[in-house]
Amino acid sequence: KRLHYDHGEKKSWDERFQELLEYKRENGHTVVPQTYPKLGEWVKSQRKNYKYLKDGKKAALSTEQALKLADVGFVFDATNRRGKNTT
C-alpha cells in the first residue's frame, strides 16, 4: 500500500506548525506557496479546515489550533495575495 507522503512520513500538526514558524523566521511571513514542498499542502489544508470550522462544519482543525495560527500571523484567506509580493 503506497502512502501519499514521502517514505510513509506523516508529521503531526505540531511538527508542521514548527515548520511554519521556521518558514516565517526565514521569509518574514506565513504565506507559504502551495508549491512549497509539504508545508504548502499543509497550509492549504489549514485554510480549508478553517473555513469548515468557521462555517460550523466538521473540521480537522481545532479552535485552539486556529488560535495558534492566528497568533503567528497566519493568513487564513490568501485569495487576494496570489501572485503578489508578500513583503
Image: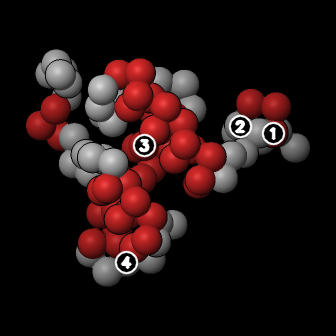
Question: Which mark lies nearer to you, 3 or 1?
Answer: 3
Res 53 → quadrant: bottom left
Question: Is residue 35 shown left or right of residue 28?
Answer: right
Q: Name the amino acid type tagged 2.
A: Tyr
Mark 2 to mark 1: distance in Å?
5 Å
Instruction: Report how far apart the C-alphas of labels 1 and 4 lie in the structure.
Output: 29 Å
The amino acid type, in three-letter code, at marker 4 is Lys
Height in image: 64 above or below 71? below
C-alpha gap between disc 2 and disc 3? 15 Å
**Quadrant in the rendering for residue 80:** top left
Left or right for 48, reference 76: right
The numbered mark, 3 or 1, whose residue comes first in the sequence reads 1
Q: Which residue is mark 2?
A: 5
Q: For residue 43, which numbered disc appears in the image? A: 3
* Image position of 58 (left or right of 74): right
Tell me the element at label 1.
Answer: helix
